[in-house]
Structures are given as structure tokens and as C-alpha cells.
Amino acid sequence: IFVRDNFISLDTVRGSSMAPSLSPHAHERGELDRVFIKRGISTKSVERGDVITFWKPHKADEISIKRVVGLEGDTVFPHRGFAVDGEGAVVVPAGHVWVEGDNSRRSYDSCDFGPVSKALIDGKATKV
């Protein structure tokens, strides 16, 4: 438990929000990918394009996995949902990241709930 909570774990990706990158055949064939998650990472090491796990802001007892598409200070243009100004642009606030699933049609992500606090980041996917 100590190693899993602080260093590395092997977790199963359920659902198709990260398809085709992760678990692309989850619904058709029930095939689920497993990923190594590096825990205890410095949030300063999180970069655009990283796949991270984080505690869901709207369901504090669940963890989600998504790709980082915006860092603090970046301007993102959500294709649906969450938008601060009339032009649809959102500036990611300090101490936050913008995350989206690779399968935008089946993903509940920052487009729905906004930027995610770096304090909610649990780990970074390192290998499928």
C-alpha cells in the first residue's frame, strides 16, 4: 500500500473517454488497458500532453485520467461547455491545469467542470 500510494501503481483504465489512446475497445470487446501511474510527482513536472490522474473536482472520492492540454496562463478554446467570456476562450488560472479526454464525445472533463487544481493531481501515466 505504501509503494502504491507514494511511488507507482498499475491501474486499469475503464471507459472510453481516453480512446483511442487508452482502452479503445472497452465498450465493444470489454478490453481494458492497464497503465503504470507514477505517484508523488511534483506538479511543476506536469507538461502539456501528459496523461495524468486526478481526484474529480465534482466527485471527491473518484479518480479520473485525462490529458493535460493547458497549463496555468495558457488560453484554451473549449469546443463545448465551460467558457468564461463570450468568445469561448478560457485562461487557465494559476495553480490549475486544463484536462480533456482524447475521445471528446465520451469525455467528462475541463470542458464540463473547468480548470483542475494542481492540488488534485494524483499521478502521471508513464507506460501502457
Image (tube, rainbow, N blue to C red):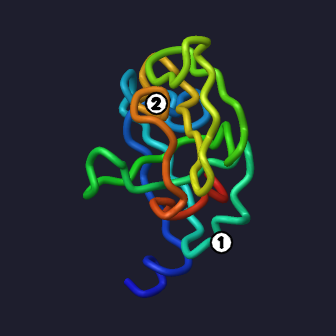
Say how many tags the image has: 2
Name the residue that disc number 1 marks. 42
Q: Look at label 1 and name its amino acid.
A: Ser
- Find residue 37 and report its horizontal and vertical position in percent: 55, 63
- Find residue 110 and report its horizontal and vertical position in percent: 48, 34
Q: Mark 2 or mark 1: which comes first in sequence?
A: 2
Name the residue that disc number 2 marks. 17
Q: Is residue 85 above or below residue 57?
A: above
Q: Nearer the viewer, mark 2 or mark 1?
A: 1
Q: CA distance from mark 2 to mark 1?
A: 25 Å
**What's the mark number on residue 105?**
none
Secondary structure at badge 1 equals loop
Residue at the image point whose x is 64% and y is 35% from the top: 91
Q: Is residue 28 above or below residue 30?
A: above
Quadrant in the rendering for residue 109: top left
User: Is residue 63 found left or right of 35 in the rendered image?
Assistant: left
Q: Look at label 2 and name its amino acid.
A: Ser
- Find residue 40 and report its horizontal and vertical position in percent: 56, 76
